[in-house]
Image: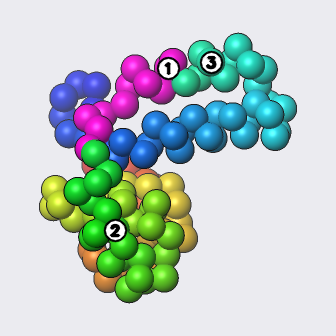
């Protein structure tokens, strides 16, 4: 991605999801201190891909969630991949199992990396 070989997209909700994951590592798991959390967020924010507003993805994400009985906040990522006609590359094996076969757009990071 840094070399320009891969174009990446993410919904704007990724910012709060990443922030929450960092907060968990800091306050719930005690793996990093407050300053480490701040540095981690700053680092992530500098490498994020182009962010897409979630509002235009909401209806399709809800339809996916209703169809597959899967949380809307994860289906937003799938809706974005479908919108761009590209794969959603994820480390979430449960998401791959739930939506990958039916949509053809959700692949596990390990599988994608071995094809790249």
Q: Badge 2, how many Cα within 10 Å: few under 14, some, many 20+? A: many
In the picture, the quarter occupied by the N terminus is top left
The total of numbered circles placed on residues is 3
Would you say residue 87 is visible in this rendering? no
- Residue 69 lies, in percent from the top left, at 48, 82
Q: Position of residue 90 (x, y in %)?
A: 44, 55
Please state if 96 lies on the left or on the right of 85 as rendered.
right
Residue drawn where x is 78% and y is 20% of the image: 33
In the shown orientation, is residue 96 left or right of residue 54?
A: right
The residue under label 2 is: 61
Q: Residue 49 sits in which quadrant?
A: top left
Answer yes or no: is residue 2 visible: yes
Residue at numbered disc 1: 43
Of label 2 and label 1, which has the lower sequence position?
Answer: 1
**61 in the magenta segment:** no
User: Which region of the structure is painted magenta?
Assistant: 42-52
Judging by the rendered image, the residue that carries numbered circle 3 is 38
Q: Is residue 46 magenta?
A: yes
Where residue 32 appears, as percent x and y from the top left, is: 76, 25
Residue 17 is left or right of residue 116, and the answer is right
Give the class, few, some or many, for how many residues have Cα within 10 Å of label 3's Cα (few <14, many ≥20): some
């Amino acid at each position: 991605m840094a070399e320009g070989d891969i174009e990446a997209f993410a919904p704007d909700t990724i910012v709060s999801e990443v922030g929450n994951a960092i907060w968990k590592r800091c306050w719930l798991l005690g793996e990093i201190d407050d300053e480490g959390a701040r540095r981690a967020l700053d680092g992530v924010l500098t490498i994020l891909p182009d962010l897409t507003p979630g509002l235009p993805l909401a209806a399709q994400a809800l339809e996916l969630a209703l169809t597959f009985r899967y949380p809307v906040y994860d289906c937003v990522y799938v809706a974005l991949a479908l919108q761009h006609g590209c794969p959603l590359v994820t480390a979430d094996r449960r998401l791959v199992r739930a939506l990958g076969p039916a949509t053809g757009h959700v692949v596990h990071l390990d599988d994608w990396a071995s094809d790249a």
